[in-house]
Image (cartoon, rainbow, N blue to C red):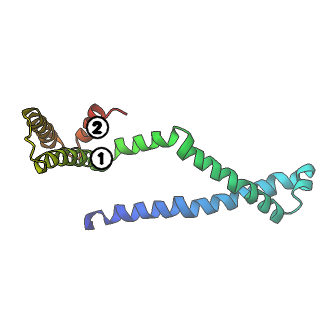
């Protein structure tokens, strides 16, 4: 962690700036600029928004629910968030590593549960099941021997084995 202190501080600074400061500053700026440069210069708009305070109140009452719906649509109703998640997965090898490791663990646990259940019922494990287990072992070992964080083998493995 010590060698990355500068980059970590830069990351935290950017998060604070973009998520909090810039957001608040942009909202105040948008309200101020639109009112004092646009609304004040048009008598029709000035009748609708007679004061800056009323404009802010109306903008907040309409804008917050509207933007909340836009944010909901972004995450739940449009393909845009999925595209962002795809880019995140492609550009962050640690995320792909976690995903592949989880898939390996789930698959291996299911196989082991099946075998333990058979053994606890005094059933024999068939040669087909043993072959499947050996094939799974080879598949995992083959992947584990080749992968590194930088060579993106985890992303390729996921694309090849888990079609979405």
Does 75 appear above or below 29? above
Q: Residue at x 69, y 50 (%)?
A: 66
> Residue 8 appears at what percent x and percent y?
36, 63
Q: Dot 2 lies on which element?
A: helix
Numbered mark located on residue 43 in the image: none
Q: Quadrant of residue 153?
A: top left
Q: Dot 1 lies on which element?
A: helix
Report if the CB atoms under discs 1 and 2 are less than 8 Å apart. Answer: yes
> Residue 64 appears at what percent x and percent y?
68, 56
The residue at which mark 1 appears reads as 99
Does 143 appear above or below 105? above
Q: Residues within 10 Å of mark 2 (few under 14, many from 20)?
A: some
First reached walking from the N terminus: tag 1 or tag 2: 1
Instruction: Report the Cα–Cα distance between label 1 and label 2.
Output: 8 Å
Query: Which residue extends farthest bottom?
Result: 2
Q: Residue at x 88, y 51 (%)?
A: 45
């Amino acid at each position: 962690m010590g060698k990355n202190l500068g980059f970590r501080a830069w990351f935290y600074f950017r998060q604070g700036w973009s998520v909090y400061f810039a957001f608040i500053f942009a909202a105040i700026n948008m309200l101020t600029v639109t009112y004092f440069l646009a609304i004040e210069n048009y008598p029709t708009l000035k009748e609708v928004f007679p004061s800056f305070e009323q404009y802010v109140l109306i903008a907040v009452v309409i804008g917050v629910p509207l933007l909340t719906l836009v944010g909901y649509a972004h995450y739940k109703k449009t393909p845009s968030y999925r595209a962002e998640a795809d880019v995140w997965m492609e550009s962050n090898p640690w995320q792909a590593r976690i995903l592949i490791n989880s898939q390996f663990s789930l698959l291996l646990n299911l196989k082991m549960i099946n075998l333990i259940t058979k053994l606890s019922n005094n059933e024999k494990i068939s040669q087909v099941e043993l072959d499947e287990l050996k094939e799974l072992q080879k598949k995992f070992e083959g992947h584990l021997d080749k992968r590194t964080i930088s060579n993106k083998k985890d992303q390729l493995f996921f694309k090849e084995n888990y079609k979405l």
